[in-house]
Image: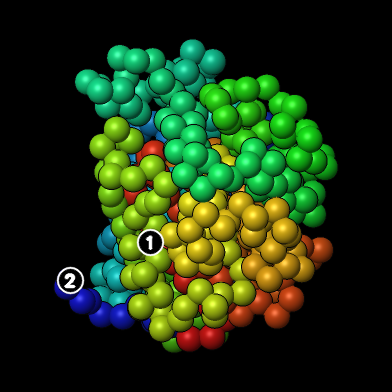
Amino acid sequence: MAEGPSLRGQVAIVGVGDTQVGKVPELSATGLCIDAAQRALDDAGLTKNDIDGLVTCNSMAEPHMYHAEAMAEHLQIFPSYCVSAGAGGGTTFAVLYQAALAIMHGVCDRVLISMADSLRTGLTREQAMVMQSSSGHPQFETPYGATVPGYYALIANAYMHKYGVTAEQMAAVAVTARAHAALHPGAQMRTPLTVEDVLASRMIADPLRLLDCSLVSDGGAAVVLARAEEAGDRPHQPVYLLGAGEGHGHEHISQAGDLTSSHARQAGERAYAMSGLSPQDIDFIELYDCFTPVVLIELEDLGFCGRGEAGAFIAAGHTRLGGSLPMNTHGGLLSHSHPGNPGAMFALTEAVRQLRGEAGERQVVNAETALIHAQGGILSSHCTAILGRDR
């Protein structure tokens, strides 16, 4: 396998910004993207004139043929590095290290990554259903009428059959996420949740119930990256990128080699190798939780649990604040928000705030290192990044 230059400690996140989430009808997807960008610039103590790199992802509610260029036009930024990314939910962290490489190699000095969408108020019900049903293989999947929850139900059933995980253990993922969201003043869903509530919610695609599924939201978030050497000049504690890695196994779920594991394992291994860290060195994690069983598979693929052990691990409370491995401390896609491809951005901004010590009631004590992971498609494309307070 080819080896490139190590990213460890070369680039820092110096600014973060989140928009309102949930129903935000007063702002379009473009307006949310611009709002997130300005919030991140303000947080970094920079202006648009300090930015020479811009990365976005396209919007489903308000698409542009050249999205990043359109956002640059709105912001009146004239970048030397300008990219519209697209790898589903895994986009966020892949572009994070790609932007870091651009900075390291002198293509640009400071990169703004801003992503947003309006899936809650920007799409009609019919448009949303078309979106949900359009991801399947046109020959082997779409003709049978499945939607995204149906594909993930295949994964859930395979995992439950192989390892004996229970619906109650999967529900504990949603309950933990809601407990953390209750401590986040900006989260979309903050009402307390019990395992019984999850099990009583309506069936969506057996065995997945409504509360096993992520939210549908408007919202956006942004970060600013800069060279490590200048990071100390910014208003906040810098957070350094220590390692990153990708793993890709398939596009369509009918072509997956295994429904109970994923290429999150390869992504994690590459990130650990670059950072020089192991799962035992990580203080908290932010994992992609589009559906509850996905979290169990990710925990195992990333080395935090043995095969088949993640359900019991979560049910025992280890991923709660105060536990041995706090997870999704902002509430994740299940309770904070999920505006589509930009959803993982909120995991990134949350990790930065945790490492700065700015998370308030939900602060992880003595947080020094974080692992963040996103996946796109139907457990298809994966990217892991490891962040730290120190280089």
Question: At which x and y percent is residue 40?
Answer: 56, 60
Amino acid at circle 1: Arg
Above or below, comparing residue 346 to residue 341 in the picture: below
Q: Which residue is at the front of the view, 144 or 85?
A: 144
Q: How many labels does the image show?
A: 2
Mark 1–mark 2 Cα distance, whole angstroms, equals: 16 Å
Q: Decide if residue 60 is in sight here.
A: no
Residue at point 30%, 71% (across, down): 101
**Residue corresponding to mark 1:** 265
Left or right of 148? Residue 104 is: left
Question: At which x and y percent is residue 233?
Answer: 55, 83
Tell me the SS state at disc 2. loop
Determine contact: label 1, label 2, CB under 8 Å. no
**Which numbered disc, 1 or 2, marks the residue that appears first in the sequence?**
2
**Residue corresponding to mark 2:** 1
Above or below, comparing residue 301 to residue 86 in the picture: below
Left or right of 75? Residue 195 is: right
Residue at point 79%, 54% (across, down): 183
Q: Which residue is at the front of the view, 152 or 25?
A: 152
Q: Which residue is at the front of the view, 190 or 80?
A: 190
Left or right of 268? Residue 211 is: right
